[in-house]
Amino acid sequence: MASLSLSKLNLFPGRVKRSATTRAIAHSASTGKALPFSLHGLRAGADAYNHGKVLRMLMFGKPGSGKGTLSSRLVKKYDMLTVSTGDLLRQHIAERSTSSFWPTAEEIVAQGGLLPDDVMLKVVTSKLDTLNNKHWILDGFPRTLGQGKLLDTHLEKQDASLTLIVNLDVADEVILSRISDRWIHLPSGRVYNTSYNPPKVDGFDDETGEPLTKRPDDNPKTFSRRLKQFYASTAPLLSYYASNPKSARLVTLQGKTSDEIWPKLEAVVRSSFPTLRERAPRRGRYSLSNPFMLTDSASFERQAAGSG
């Protein structure tokens, strides 16, 4: 599939004068030239404000950009938790949840659609409200301006506002190649990629021997639709965070692979939250959406690679 012509998409309708911040957010829709990475916040004093504060983080990126992989690396190394809405949704769909709002969820996700804002807010905040002063990262929500405002309002009432927002900028053609080669063991969530992380036996899970499957949304047609939705809904949300003086620091990170983006992400987190502690060496992770402990390091990497 040819890469979408993003230059034809007006990501910020009605806005003529664009700040440096806006240009960074809309990078994929402009010249395609790499922008220099900077650790400086968008507002003066952002680092001083966050010093010693709790890390409450959002991560944005196109479907398949590596959000899950990078957030899992943070959780594995640092004393923080992750909530992946994608994992939560896939788990409910796989288990054929009987909740009243789930009957059509599988069909919507398979078509690359988004669930209603109020449903997603309930799913997410039911987890976040239990964290108190713990460090956390939220992956996959909010995805629209409306969701962002709802989340901000809820967190402000809980005196637990966001403190860092990260936007991943990965080229469309890189992501398409990645998802085309991806296979999943649905019961466990283990993910394989035939290009760089293949199963021992082609088409079968390493641990159970059960057959692997493709996600319904892992195909060029659905990816194209999801990408259009991403730009239509997420660009206004990023613009909202960039222009809102009450919002947390917003940083855009560019790269082709998670390995390339990782040191940039870690530098941002460490510079903004120097009191964040590293975990004692161990294998696996704790996650609110995946509460069991993974004991095999290879399995951990497979699990992490699938949620981006």
Image (spheres, rainbow, N blue to C red):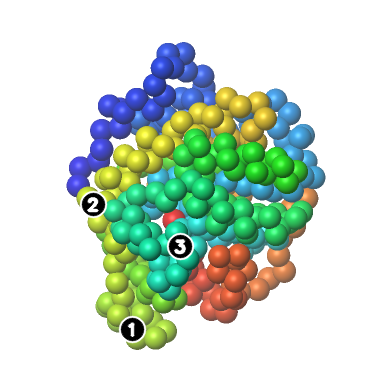
Where residue 235 appears, as percent x and y from the top left, is 44, 33
Residue under circle 1?
Answer: 210
Q: Nearer the viewer, residue 241 or 37?
A: 241
Residues at marks 1 and 2, CA–CA distance in whole angstroms: 26 Å
Residue at 76% over, 54% down: 133
Res. 220 mark: 2
Write the residue at 46% across / 62% down.
100
The disc labelled 3 sits on which kind of residue? Ser
Most foreground residue, 228 or 253: 228
Judged by depth in the image, the label closer to the viewer, 3 or 1, is: 3
Image disc number at residue 100: 3
Identify the amino acid type marked 1.
Glu
| Residue 273 is at least partly visible in this image | no
- Is disc 1 placed on a helix, strand or loop? loop
Q: Quadrant of residue 152?
A: top right
Q: Quadrant of residue 129?
A: bottom right
Q: Are marks 2 and 3 in contact (CB under 8 Å)?
A: no
Label 1 CA crowd tier, 10 Å (few <14, some 14–19, many 20+): few
Distance, label 2 to label 3, CA atoms, is 31 Å
Q: Which residue is at the far left?
A: 1
